[in-house]
Amino acid sequence: MRLSHRITLLIVALLSVTALSVAASLIWLGDRALTSRADSDSRAIAGLLADGASLAALIPGIVTQEVGRQMIAEATLAGMMVDAARQGGISDYEINLRLAEAAARTALDEIWVLKPDGLVVYGTNAQYDPPNPGQRDDSLAHAFEAVAQGRRWAESKVPLELPDYSKPMAFAAVRLGDGHLVVVGQNLGVSDDLRRRIGPSRTIETMVGQADIQAVWIFSEAEAVLAGTNLGGHASPTPAELAGVREAIQSGRTKTVAAKGATSVVSPLLDADRLPIGTVLVRFSTAAAEAAAHRNIAISVGLAALLLAFGAVAARLVSGRISGPILAIADAARAVHDRSFRAAMLASVGGRADEIGGLARDFTKMAEQVLAREEELDRLVALRTAELAERNSQLTQAVNAIQADLDAARALQQAILPQVFPDRASLSGKAVMTAARHVGGDFYDFFMVDEEHMAVLIADVSGKGIPAALFMAVSRTVLRARAIMTPAPAECVPSANDEIVSQNPQELFITVFYGLLNIRTGDFRYVNAGHLPPVHVGRAGIARIPCSRGMALGVMDGLSFREDRMTLAEGDTLVLYTDGVSEAMNEGDQEFTDQRVLDSVGRHAGKPVGDILDGLVADVAEFVGEAPPSDDLTCIVLRYLGGGTVSVSARGGIEADA
């Protein structure tokens, strides 16, 4: 598709989006205004009805409260009249007549004078019948028990429902000086009539049919219809409207329910404490609002059509002027890529005075600079490539030389470690040291210091790599020399520590376990300088040998170390190892742990020393998996065969691996 066509389509598309957006905005704003106006009017009318209904519900209660007060006053006057009549010596018959006259001249229906136990002394009812001898009214006495017992002077109960009465009535009682009760009663017809006179029914009848109101209902707190009317056959609220009634009662806030052709507003009825006691539902017709919305849609669509028509004509005119120069610049860009660009290709476009002309002139300058820089870059790349090849060759030679030195250092380190145990029939052992890198800082050693004593030691230098390996070589030499001179552990280790401190410029340290075994008696003397205690496998089981854990060598001079002692029985085995065994880590950064060392030794305890060592190393390798080595791994397995004359070959050989 040609660029001019694309520009035309783009402009038309943008105008279409703009026109549709404007039309949609006008429609939405118009509908929103109509809806807001209808909702505002609906809420105002519903609120007015709700306030009227709430007031109508409150007034009878206020009137009833005043009736209760008035009845207490009337009961007080009746009591005063009875007291005066009794003090004047008037007969009971005459007192009953006066009470009947008082009931006839007032709104009271009943007047009774009771004893606290409910026995009727004087009184009259709505038919003005005097009480019968022994007549009782236990229900009234029980209802006003607080007054009868003197806890209250007077009390009114409006309404009060008693078993001896057909319908609830209003009662009030006062206490006389002699403890008698004066109780007056009155029907509730006045409050009911007042509720009918000021109720919302007349307001509903007046409002329905005006302001597009279709129907009005008033609901109680239990969602029962108390009053209502409708027009056009809308006989009952819809389920959605009833749901709105329920929400308004629960939340105490006005709810709006929208439906096709109508909008309903539900407002809560509030009591004196502003708590919902019911709702008013007003349904309004939305026909007028919908008609106005249709008019807005027609006007908006017409404006959008006119805008699109004008835009299509303008787009066709503009696209031709824009696309031609752009196509020329695109051809020039391809020429730059092919390195065939010439300044004359954009001469006509560069003569324009607008932004496209400026773009063409800038593009011409940029293209000439790019071509010149590409030539220079090609020359520099060729030069740098030759230099890089030469340096790579030199780096390869250096790496090969370093690798050769490391291999030689590894072979030398392995060579200085003893390869076989002393040739003694009372001993069997095997050892291994595997460096985490090319060279390591762990080492072991065992040698005879005289005909009856063999020195055995295992050590771990802090750090890894070449510095640790050099310090390891120095430390091993010092320890071996001191052991030969003063083999006793308590003397050898402190002397070696002082010399190592003097030859420790990098302030490294080394943990050491040094032991001296009497191969004839099995007596084993040892010093632990910060190292892991060896594992002892004997007839009593598998456990670590008891030993103190002194400070590592190389930290400071002048230290003394405690010497411990134990006796190995025939067949006892010692397993010495560095923390590269117990702290070997798998891919989940979990350590092998000392407990796993004990478990592994226990599984292979009855086997030859070579199998014990191989089993432990295999268990560590299986645990570590594909994780890289975290530390040097060093281990010695030594078994004491007793001071007899058993030959070496009969015990499976003496060997050491490194």
Image: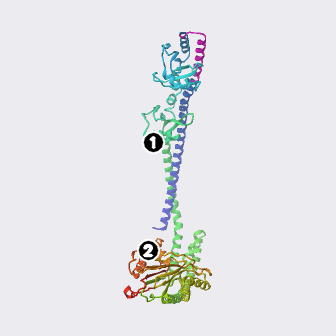
Toward the viewer: 650 or 583?
A: 650
Asked which quadrant contains residue 84, the reply is top right
The residue singled out by tag 1 in the image is 259
- Between the C-alphas of marks 1 and 2, the distance is 86 Å
The answer to whether residue 192 shows anywhere in this view is no
Residue type for callout 2: Ile
The x, y position of residue 573, in whole percent, is: 43, 79
Looking at the image, residue 84 lies above or below residue 620: above
Residue type for callout 1: Ala
Looking at the image, residue 295 lies above or below residue 483: above
The residue singled out by tag 2 in the image is 542
**Stretch of the chain drawn in magenta:** 68-92
Q: Quadrant of the N terminus?
A: bottom left
Disc 1 is placed on an element classified as: strand
Disc 2 is placed on an element classified as: strand
Compare marks 1 and 2 and give the one earlier in the sequence.
1
The reply to whether the magenta stretch includes residue 600 is no
Residue at 59% in and 21% down: 73
The x, y position of residue 146, in whole percent, is: 55, 26
Prevailing secondary structure class for the magenta stretch in the rendered image: helix
Q: Residues within 10 Å of mark 2 (few under 14, many from 20)?
A: some
Specify the color scheme: rainbow
